[in-house]
Amino acid sequence: MTKLLLVPLDDIVVFPNMNVTLTVDVGDEDRVLLVPKHDGEYAAVGTVARVTDRVRLPGGAVAVAIEGLHRGIAGAAETDPQGRLLVEIEERKDGVPTDEKTRHLETEYRAVVEEILELRGDDGRIQSFVRSIAEPGALADTSGYSPDLTFEQKVQLLEAVDVTERLELALGFQRERLSLMQIRQRIRDDVNVGMEKQQREFLLRKQMDSIRKELGEDDASVVDEYRKKIEEADMPEEVREQADKELARFERMGESSPESQMIRSYLDWLLAVPWGVRSDEVLDPEHTREILDADHAGLEDVKDRIVEYIAVAKLRKERGIEPDKRAGAILTLIGPPGTGKTSIGESIAKALNREFVRMSLGGVRDEAEIRGHRRTYIGALPGRLVRALRDAKTMNPVILLDEVDKVGADWRGDPSAALLEVLDPAQNSTFRDHYLDVEVDLSQVFFIATANMAETIPGPLLDRMEVIRFDGYTTDEKVAIARGYLWPRQRERAGLEEKEVSVSDDVLETVISEYTREAGVRQLERELGSILRKTATKIVTNEAEPPVDVDVEAVRDALGRQKFFREAAERTAVPGVATGLAVNVTGGDVLFVEATSSPGEGFTLTGQLGDVMKESAQIALSAVRSQTDRLGIDQEAFERKFHVHVPAGAIPKDGPSAGITMATALASLLSGRPVKHTVGMTGELTLQGRVLPIGGLKQKVLAAHAAGLTDVVIPERNRADLDDVPEHVREELRFHPVMSLDEVLGIALEPAQASRPHVAA
């Protein structure tokens, strides 16, 4: 055992191979034991050090230069006569282990330390020092130089006497240190990248601002440009205040603000509305009538209403009466497809010298399509009405709301409810779009809505409309339309000149009656297009020499066999078949009702009949039963099984207006008297045999006329509706207004013959 002077070091750890200078008095001792001390506690292991030099400092203090040699474990202690503490120590010099684990730890330790030095930006001198150390124990002790290790960690390292354990402990400390330094480096790199990006953006923005200033496009010039546009726009006072408010926000924020683009979009839309811009109306009723007659055949009700509107507007203007914002015109054209509802809007706009905008509402399900989106949403836009005004560039255009009966509703709202304000003359002068959030005056807009059916239009919306019904065209009107509009248009599309092809009215009437059955003229135009394309092909292939006169044979060659027949005479030749008149979405049509009986009991109805129509059949049978004496029918005839069928079976049918037709078919069956083939009928029947009025009389009469019928039985209370039927149709048909089933049967049934049986088997 060796006794050495114990030198306590407060919060200092000296490792072997270290050279330090300490301000301690070691007397004449050549070697001392340096022991770390903290809060009165000594480490278990110290460093045996050799005193290499003594220096007297100014003021009389003594400093010694000490070199660490190896570790020493303190044992028993005693005090010498000078009061110094001497301890017995066990000197522990490091060995040089040669096992695989130590060599692996040594290699890894060197790699970690080199990585740390690279991160710290070492100039290579420390790396050279570390590489020069060959002993693993001394290599592990180099961690004592690290300023990042705590006092406790250095003490642990000093107390690790075993070289392998010490190297493992030092490697763990250095790994932690490396991880921490790598994290700090990543953070530092991210911060530097962010700062560089911000600096780059700042520099670019400054350069952009300088370029804009040179071009006169800086924020100030943009604001001045908007201010000039706002002053030039004839905005209402409320709208002007809103525009100035938004422009002030934009000026405060500047171009670089994320919200600036949204404000600019809003100002652009606000300026896109043609505030104060109006078309100069041509208020000439006669000129308007000429334009409407030139563009459309028929449609007298619509033309009369437009002429009335213009006449009233002209009268008010001439007499200096202020325009009434609550007196807007909102016409709704309801009728079958292909009758010219959409095209009439363009003619009205041309007659009024107004701009025309068409808005298709078919399938629209989002209320925002009408009112617009709130500005808070990404991609927000004004509604279709504001966009229509922008497209028209005037505040008094003609806006056609096409297919208003096909507007849908779902979780996004009900667009038809949003139209309530738009189509109400008492409200649309203060229409407020969600995006613009200012009042837009729509009272000067001439709204025209179109629909195929009034039943699918919500009641409150329909109440705001002035309904004009399109009931289809007569054959003569279709011939006129084909001659004046359809034939020239299709001839031009086929590439033919007027002198190269011609057609007579009789041939056009053949196409209408034998190849089309519609209220409008769309199918007719398609058929004419087929004929002209066939003709053009023959001319190109030298099969025909122009001029070509299209005859019935050419029609058959182009369109094929006849598609529709006037079969009332053949169908009603036997008892039990009556010709009724019906109306649907596409216009009027002829409806045959067939009745048969067979042994048994029961009453069968076929033909996809609705509940109302089934009840009408039951009523018809009961009403006929009450007429047995007059018809000469035996009561036993009703003790059979009856079957009533309404072709075509694939088409659903409903409604009460076939009541007298069913009764006539049953009466014809039971009496054996056929129904006159020239008679068509419509009317609701009661159990008492009374005939009640029905709707759609005009369409039904037109269908009877097209089918070649000459006599039409109608309810007495529908007599006034005959005024809606074109005059030339009224002249060609005989109408029989009736009040009871007796009158119907008297008109419809052939006279009784003694040879005919009373019951049809």
Image (cartoon, helix red, strand yellow):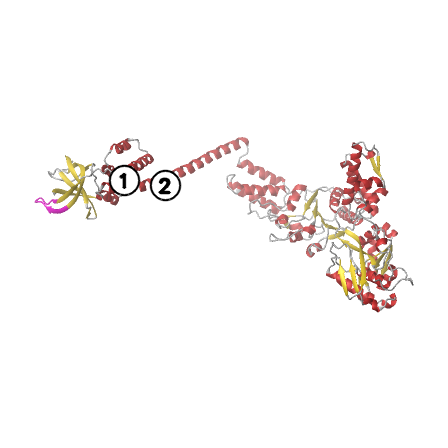
Q: Which element type, helix, strand or loop, lies under badge 1?
A: helix
What are the residue bounds of the magenta stretch? Answer: 75-86
**Is disc 1 in contact with disc 2, using a CB cutoff of under 8 Å?**
no
- Residue type at the position of mark 2: Ile
Is residue 312 shown above or below 17?
Answer: below
Disc ID at residue 437: none
The Cα–Cα distance between marks 1 and 2, rounded to whole angstroms, is 29 Å
Q: Which element type, helix, strand or loop, lies under badge 2?
A: helix
What residue does disc 2 label? Answer: 183
At 51% from the left edge and 39% from the top edge, which residue is drawn? 254
Which quadrant would residue 284 be assigned to in this image? top right
Which quadrant would residue 504 be assigned to in this image? top right
The answer to which of 399 and 104 lies nearer the viewer is 104
The answer to whether any part of residue 692 appears in the image is no
Q: Earlier in the sequence, mark 1 or mark 2?
A: 1
83 in magenta: yes
At 50% from the left edge and 39% from the top edge, which residue is drawn? 256
- Residue 52 horizontal/vertical position (percent): 15, 34
Is residue 399 left or right of 231 when viewed as pictured? right
The answer to whether any part of residue 74 appears in the image is yes
Q: Residues within 10 Å of mark 2 (few under 14, many from 20)?
A: few
- Residue 755 horizontal/vertical position (percent): 91, 62
Quadrant where the C terminus lies?
bottom right
10 in magenta: no
Is residue 21 left or right of 720 when viewed as pictured? left
Which quadrant would residue 619 be assigned to in this image? bottom right
The answer to which of 406 and 578 lies nearer the viewer is 578
What residue does disc 1 label? Answer: 101
The answer to which of 640 and 654 lies nearer the viewer is 640
Residue with the most extreme right position: 754
- Residue type at the position of mark 1: Lys
